[in-house]
Amino acid sequence: MSWWKRFVAIFKSEATDVKQGLTNVGQALDDELARKERELAATPEERIDMILEDQAAEDARFDQLTERVLGKSSEADAVAEVADEQRAPAEPAAPDDPTEPGA
């Protein structure tokens, strides 16, 4: 393959990646615009419900961050990891290991 064909292939690959990225950004902007339009068209009661849902989602996110900061999730992960290691069979000692009994 000539250098030109490789260059064109790389360029096409990058162009595809950029196109996909722009499509994703456009979709995210469309979704956000649709959400804002729903908020503007909502009645006061519906708007209060939307605000409460947003608040609940942020509270859940905050709780996750709090657990990470306090080390609760890390502690649970560490406990699970130690339990897994304790259940795993020990590796056999090397044959020339002087710490092995009878060696």
Image (tube, rainbow, N blue to C red):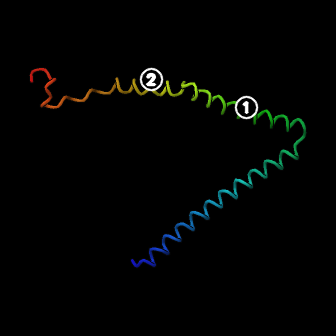
Question: Please, what secondary structure does the residue beneath circle 2 have?
Answer: helix
Q: Residues within 10 Å of mark 2 (few under 14, many from 20)?
A: few
21 over 62 or under it: above or below: below
Q: Amino acid at mark 2?
A: Val
| Residue 101 percent across, percent down from the top left | 13, 20
Q: Which residue is mark 2?
A: 79
Residue 95 position within the rendered picture, expressed as x and y whole percent measured from the top left: 13, 31
Total numbered circles: 2
Badge 1 crowding class, 10 Å Cα cut-off, few under 14, some 14 to 19, many 20 or more, is: few
Q: Residue at x 70, y 53 (%)?
A: 28
Between 31 and 15, the one nearer to me in the picture: 15
Q: What is the quadrant of residue 102 in the picture?
A: top left
Q: Residue furthest left?
A: 103
C-alpha distance separating marks 1 and 2: 30 Å
Residue 11, relative to residue 54: is it above or below? Answer: below
Determine whether, in the image, residue 20 is placed left or right of residue 86: right
Which amino acid is tagged 1? Ala
Image coordinates of residue 5 in percent, x first then y, are: 45, 77
User: In screen coordinates, is 88 left or right of 35?
Assistant: left
Quarter of the rendering containing residue 30: bottom right
Q: Residue at x 87, y 43 (%)?
A: 42
Q: Earlier in the sequence, mark 1 or mark 2?
A: 1
Is label 1 in a helix, a strand or a loop? helix
Relative to residue 31, is residue 48 drawn left or right? right
From this viewpoint, which residue is outermost toward the right? 44
Res. 29 image quadrant: bottom right
Q: Which residue is mark 1?
A: 56
